[in-house]
Structure formats: structure tokens, C-alpha cells
Image (cartoon, grey):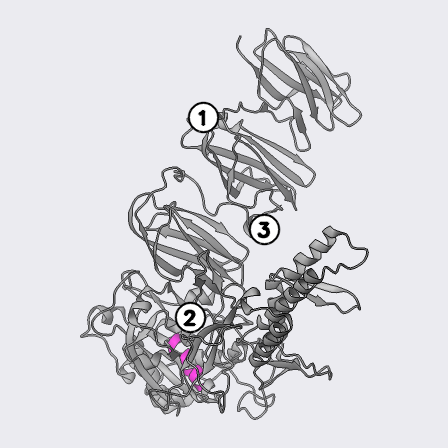
Amino acid sequence: MYMQTKNKKLESTWTSLEGCCPGLDMYAQTIRRCVNARFISRTHKVEPNITQSQCNAIHALKTNHNIVINPADKEGAIVIQNRTEYCKEVYQQLNHQENCMQLQANPTKEYTCETKHINHLFGSSPSEFPTHPYPTYFSQNLPKESEDIDTVSVGERSLLETENPFVERSDDTGKEEVDIPFNLPKLAFDFKERNEKGEVVEEFLVDRTAKVKHEGKARKKGQKGTSENKQVSIENKGATDGQQYKLKEIKDDMYNLKSIKMDLSEFEALDTYACKISPRSTVQKLVKELLAYASTDLERVRAIWIWICCHIEYDVKGFHNKDTKQNSPNDVLKSGKAVCAGYSGLFCEMCSLADVKCTIIEGYSKGYNYDVGKKFTGEADHAWNAVFLDGKWHLLDSTWGAGHVNDTCSKFTFKYVEFYFLTHPTLFINNHFPNDEKWQLISPKIPLKIFENMVFRTGEFYDIGLTYIHPEVQVVPTVNGRVIINVEGLYPTYFIFNLDGKKDCGILTITKYGMKLEVLPQKAGEFRLKIYAKLFDSKEETYSFICGYLVKCDFIEENFKLPKVFHNPLGPSWITENKGLLKPSHPEPIIYCDDGSCRIRFMLNRDLSFTSKLSCDEVKLSEEVMRNHVFKTQHGNWVEFQIHLPAAGLYVFAIFSKEKARRSPTHDHVCEYFIFCRDQNVHWPSFPKVFSSWTDGCELIEPLSGVLPRNEMVTFKLKIPHVRKVQVYGKSPCPLTMSKDGYWEGRCYTQDSKFLSVGVSDKMFDTKFTFALQYEIEDS
């Protein structure tokens, strides 16, 4: 809960605590609007000078719970916002911590009382009002298993519900709400989504709450080595000219996924210093030098973590040969190699020397050699750590933070993963299951069976800013022969996928900050789906593996089979916008046209030239003939592709473009659609053949068909700018005349000729014409 302080005027209303319930105030506004609308409806009161349609529109706004209406700065004005945009705005304001201070009061009781008061006044039961689930929240409980362990209680309840059997409850006296991240789906807020059956669709997703401060900003006074008078020097201490490993640059990030509040930008100098420290002869000497500029327990843990991630590589030989692996801290320090037991043992030893309480945790993990759908049995296969900071235990995994191995575990690659440092327990449990359930650090505890079926996400999933994935289980059956996967995040992202190594078994659509993947197995059976991603501005050429599913298919959709050759992603997206194509007429990847014809239109923000390709596995026509079933019109800053299908079927329509100023003749792929027509009676003729004189700015009104009937009078109407004469050539020439609206018009007779051609000349008295269009004449 926050209250504005710097503007002097203290509001009596409350705004939800970061990570608790940002939608609660909006929920109460919804109830008020619904009650107000119902009151107006019952009393039949309509404001003067308002028509019935206007009244209905106002009523619709008042009762629409997806709309938020607030007063504007000017008296009498209002602001109407989409619910999601409103939530984002509230979150941004709350995240500006310099203007806010934390309050201790719990607003939930106030809203419960307000709801009861509304029900009493209007005699309505709670069920009459639209109910949104109360956002998932975390609250601190007293330790159960050990005095050293705090558990995080996870629960969900509606504002109008009195009890929830899934929430661990206790008295409020003497307890504080934990100001930590909480469970969120799309964008920034945790509004539970429900499917058509009313079932809750939720994920263990965490809001990123840490606020980035300007680079170089001094920390609070009293912190050794970080005040203005004593800056950390990274030029001398332990730095070597031939430093073998470099710490991956950590970008400024307004969010993180941690179990403790932190500002990653404040660690930049410390991280760089820790990374430059070379190994020492003993762990004691290393820790002494490493912690020279660390003044808090968090900074000590951070320095140890960074050093291990930068200097200790995974022992791939020791993994395959247990006799050669070295796990003691000094042996790991000497060799610079370790398996997970060596990583966690060294980390624990270094923390002990730094007077930070630390422990080693063993359990099951979804790491190397993990197969989606695997059942865990036998001994533990991984080890990680927990550290005690600020009165709580926090989880981390330096093995996975250092990098990754290849598919055969024969090569290790240093690739720093920030996600596994003090990860929030509700995220850590996704791929770490401790033998002792108390180290889950969440409540209620998750059984092994649920852990096995939780969707498999890697640390890279969160490191690139992804926040939402559905389904949340990793074993998914097909419905009507398909499975739909949705992923969203904070930034534009590229995605690719494969299904048992095949890339053409689904339809991938890129959204503003994520993707939608429709998987369509081509035969029955079990398939392993792997999804990869990278940020749009990433300098890396490779994609990172982010998640996996096991798809079970027992039914094949015979009426919709994917084409043999096509390229994902399908449909327009921010990728096509970056290439200059805006405002698509068809935003979806599949165009259904019952009559076999469609027009695809884009607005352009740069000077482009285009080419296209139409193909269909079921239609056996040459590429040249198929090309004539597409007619392009480009005028001003718009381009339009008119398509007439030669027969029913599923077509692939690909668009290619290049900047006109570029001399290269190669056009780049920019967008691709599926065009589907089921009507077997569809048989469109081709468009007229186009020649070089038909340039940008030309427009054809009629005839559009490239095949004309014999022995009939045909009307021509077309626009060709910058020419002086236009003439139709058949058995005899037929000149066209310019109309007042700028079109060349005329009527020509089709007889005793195989073709009709439209010729143009840019000189009034020139007898030479160049062809722009050519029509075929039907055989008699």
C-alpha cells in the first residue's frame, strides 16, 4: 500500500502494494459502476438532451468491467482506459518509489466492508455483480519445519468470498505482508484467466519489481566502498591482461525475478571487480580479496556468485567418469572445474568464510539430459544452495548460472544466466525439486507428481523478459488434432520451434511481445516440442532454448493439412512493420475466402518494390501461371495484392520486398499468409499478364480477367500516369481516351485475334508503343 507524500496532499484512498493486488481498486470501481447503472435502470432516469442510443452507450460503458473511467485533470472531463493499460499505468506510478512511502494498513477489509455496504443499500447479492478473482498474493507465515526457514504462502481468493480452502490462513496480529514479487500472467499484472469451462488458468509468474537507478548514482552513506568518497577500483585488484572469461554484460533492467528486492545496476562495479579477480592458492585467500569491497551480506553473496560463474567451468569429463571428478572446494579452485556438487560445495565454503549462513540442497532437476515427461526416481541428480539474508532463506544455483553443456555433455560454454541468482521460490520450483520439501520455501508444498508435469522452462525464458506461458503443464493432448501454445513477455522477441526436429509441423504467429504457436502433428503419436527465442535487438545469432512440451496426438485433422513448403512466422507482425509494411488489411495468418478471391493491403513507410509467390500442393500449375493469379497495385504509400484462386485448396502466399534505392535485384521475404478456400466450384481465371510499362501508380479497374470472351465488346478502364497515349491492340488498334477523373477508357471488340494488348506511349505523335498489359482471347 502506498500513499503519495511529495505533493503534500495525502489522499485517503489506498493503492495496492507492489505485488499484492493492483486490480482491487479497479474491481471496486467496477462494482460502483454496475450498481450505479442498475440504480438508473430501476428508476428509469435518463439525463436530459440524451438520446436513447446515447443512453445505451453510456450504460454499456458503465457496465463493462474491461473499461476504467476516471476523472481527468480538467473539471468535468473523464478518461476512459482499457483495463490492461490502466494496470500498467498504476504499476509504473507505484514503481516510482521516490514519490511513495509504504503504509501498514490492509485495504482488503475496507473493500469487503464497502461491498457489504453496497449490498445492503441496493439489496443485491454478491453473485449479481461481476466477480474477478482476487489476485494471487504471497504473505509471510511463521516457520513450521524449522525456526530458520520462512515459507511463502500461495493462495487465491475472490473479493466476495469469505473462505478459501487453498489458502493457509492465520491471525493478522504481529505479522507483516512480505513485499516481494508475486504471481503474474500477461504484461504486468496477475488477473487470473479462465477458460470456457470457468477453470482458472494460472502460472507461477513473478512481477519484476526492482527499479533501475541511473548509472553511476552513489549508494547510501555508510556502505563501505560505495559512497562518493570511496569508489570501487576495477583497474588493478587481481585483474590480468589475459583474462580468459568475461562476464556477460548485464543490461539495465527495470524488473527482476528475485526473492529479495535489489537493483542490479548497483552491482555493476562489484560484478566487474569480482569477475577480474584471478584464482588464488586457497579459498581463504580468494575470499579475503574478493570481499574487499563488499560491505553487506547481499554484496558478499553476489561477489562469490559472480566469481564462481565466471571462473568455474562444468567438468564434462567428471560427469561421465565419477572417478575423475573433484568436489572438494580446494580441488575445484585448483582445477577450475566441477560438477554441481563441486559448484555448490565451493559456494557454501566461500559463504562460510564470509560469515554468511549457507547450505547445500540436493534433489531432482530439469537440467541436462532431462526428457520432457520424465518421471523422477532414485537418488538426487543435482545440488544447489540456499543462503540466509535479511532473516530469510533464498535459493540460487551457480552451476546453471555459469553456462550450459551441449546435447552430449562433451563441451561446456560459459554463458552467464542472471535468473538463477536468488530466484523467487515459486519460479525455482519449476526445475528444482529438493529431497527435503521444506527447501521449496513455498506453502502449500508441491508434490513430485505436480513438479514432473509443470511446463519445462529454462532460465533463458526469464532472462530475455518472457513472463507468461500457457498451457502450464508440459504433457498436453491435442484437441481436434492441434495444440495451442501462447508465450508473452516484455519485449519484441523472435521465436522458432521444432517438433521432434521438424520445423513445419505448426503455425507460428508473432505478437507484439510474444507469440502464438498452433502445433498440428501430421500423424498420431507422442512428440517432443522445443521452443527457442531471442530478443529482437540481440547481437547473438543463435536462439536460446526456453521451454519444452510433450504433445500427445491421437487424432489427425484430415480437412486441414499443412503445406509441404512454407515459412514461419505467418501473418503480419512487428517484424513486417520493421520492414516497412504497416496497417495490414488481414492481421491474422490464415485468410478464409469462400469465393476464392481476396485483397491484401498494406500501408508503406518507405519506398519499396515488391514481388510475390502463390503456391498450392493440390493445384498442379506452373509458377508463371500461378504468378498471374496475383495482381499488384501500388499507389502512393499503399500496396495491394488482389488474389484470384484457380481452384479450391490451401495456398501459401509469400510477399517479398526491397528498397528501391538498393541496387541489388534480390527481394527479401517480409510476410507470408495461408489462403484457404473450400468451395470446389471456384475456378478463377488469371489476371492479365503484366509488362515493365505497368509501373507503380497504375490502376486497373476493368477488365480484371486475363481471359476475354471472343466476339464481344469489352470495356476498358485503367489508370496509367505519365503517358500521352494508350491504345489496345488486337486485329486492329483501338485508342483509349482520358476521362475527367484521370482514367483511360474505351471499348474494344474481340475477334480474329489470339491476344489483346494494352500499349502506351509517352509522346503524342510517336507511333511506337510499349506493352503494359496483355489479355488472352478464348478459343471459339
Quick check: 299 left or right of 324? Answer: right
- Give the SS element for disc 2: loop
Instruction: Name the residue that disc number 1 marks.
Output: 622
Is mark 1 in CB contact (under 8 Å) with mark 3?
A: no
Comes first in the chain, label 1 or label 2 = 2
**Residue 79 in view, yes or no:** yes
Task: Identify the residue shown where x is 59% and y is 79%.
Answer: 113
Residue mark closest to the camera, 1 vs 2: 1
Kindly report the distance in space between the C-alpha atoms of the residues bearing marks 2 and 3. 30 Å
Foreground residue among 770 and 89: 89
Q: Main secondary structure of the magenta part?
A: helix
Q: Position of residue 49 (x, y in %)?
A: 81, 55
Does 581 appear above or below 156? above
Is mark 2 in CB contact (under 8 Å) with mark 3?
A: no
**Badge 3 amino acid:** Asn
Q: Point out which mark residue 416 bears.
A: 2
Does 553 appear above or below 14? above
Is mark 1 in CB contact (under 8 Å) with mark 2?
A: no
Quick check: 526 left or right of 11? Answer: left
Q: Which residues are magenta?
A: 300-311
Instruction: Name the residue that disc number 3 marks.
Output: 578
**Badge 1 amino acid:** Ser
Residue mark closest to the camera, 2 vs 3: 3
- Give the SS element for disc 3: helix
Kindly report the distance in space between the C-alpha atoms of the residues bearing marks 1 and 2. 52 Å
